Image (cartoon, grey):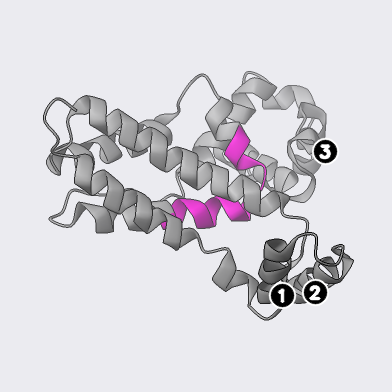
Amino acid sequence: MSLRRERILRVAARLADEGGLDAVSMRRLGEALRVEAMSLYRHVTGKEDVLDGLADLVVSQFEVPTPEPDWKAAMRRSAISAHEVLLRHPWASGLIESRRSAGPARLRYLEAVIAVLAAAGFTMPMAVRAIMVLDSYVYGFVLQELAWPFEAETAREDAAAFARALPAGAYPNLLALAEMAASTSRESLIEFEFGLDLLLDGLDRHRAVPGA
């Protein structure tokens, strides 16, 4: 199989999925592709170029929204898609937001988002605010999920253990919350779409505000 930029980035993504971004180096890429590391420089300029490419590769998997009468439905599908993709690539949230240059997939995605918001009646300043709010929610929610110290399989047991460890009578509200969590599925408590709908409804109320 010939060495191409696309193939290099796919292998880099696999290394990152397995060991995080620290596992991505030109040497490791060369070993995984069974080529000399110097051969990679015909297709990428170095690790920073690989990281830019990785960020764009992940964004290329987001559903790109298109203008339609129900703008919230379009943005909702896109945000849910981004959330699912970012959970599959735990290293990607921080990487995408930290890159100074945007690749073609990121540019195409942002252009489409602005087009949807503009068609829905958002002014440009309000569209910028909407993008910031939605991106903050999507990326932030993923980071919080990934950092959560409790596994889904043991969430109820962990909540029950937390409740038992609380000093008697000291934290009644925390105790009530922990007892509720011990009898409820983790998925019903940590619900991405609940917050997303709140944000979209709030943005809908502000999109036609004069001077916004």
Which x, y percent locates residue 155? 74, 71
Label of residue 47 in the image: none
Amino acid at the residue labelled 1: Glu
Label of residue 160 in the image: 2
What is the residue that sits farthest to the front in this orientation? 169
Write the residue at 80% across / 45% down: 19
What is the residue that sits farthest to the bottom in this orientation? 183
| Residue 212 lies in the magenta stretch | no
In the foreground, 60 or 189? 189
Determine whether label 2 and label 1 are within 8 Å by CB.
yes
Query: Callout 3: 10 Å neighbours few (<14), some, many (20+)?
Result: few
Most common secondary structure along the magenta stretch: helix
According to the picture, the residue beneath numbered tag 3 turns out to be 31
Hey, which quadrant is residue 7 in on the image?
top right
Q: Is residue 31 above or below residue 125?
A: below
Amino acid at the residue labelled 2: Ala
Hey, which quadrant is residue 24 in on the image?
top right
According to the picture, the residue beneath numbered tag 1 turns out to be 179
Determine whether label 3 and label 2 are within 8 Å by CB.
no
Alpha-carbon distance for marks 1 and 3?
50 Å
Task: Classify mark 2: helix, strand or loop.
Answer: helix
Query: Is residue 5 something that shows in the picture?
Result: no
For the record, the magenta segment spans 80-94
Determine whether label 1 and label 3 are within 8 Å by CB.
no
Which x, y percent locates residue 101? 48, 20
Image check: 130 left or right of 14? left
Alpha-carbon distance for marks 2 and 1?
6 Å
Write the residue at 52% across / 57% down: 84
| Dot 3 or dot 2, earlier in sequence | 3
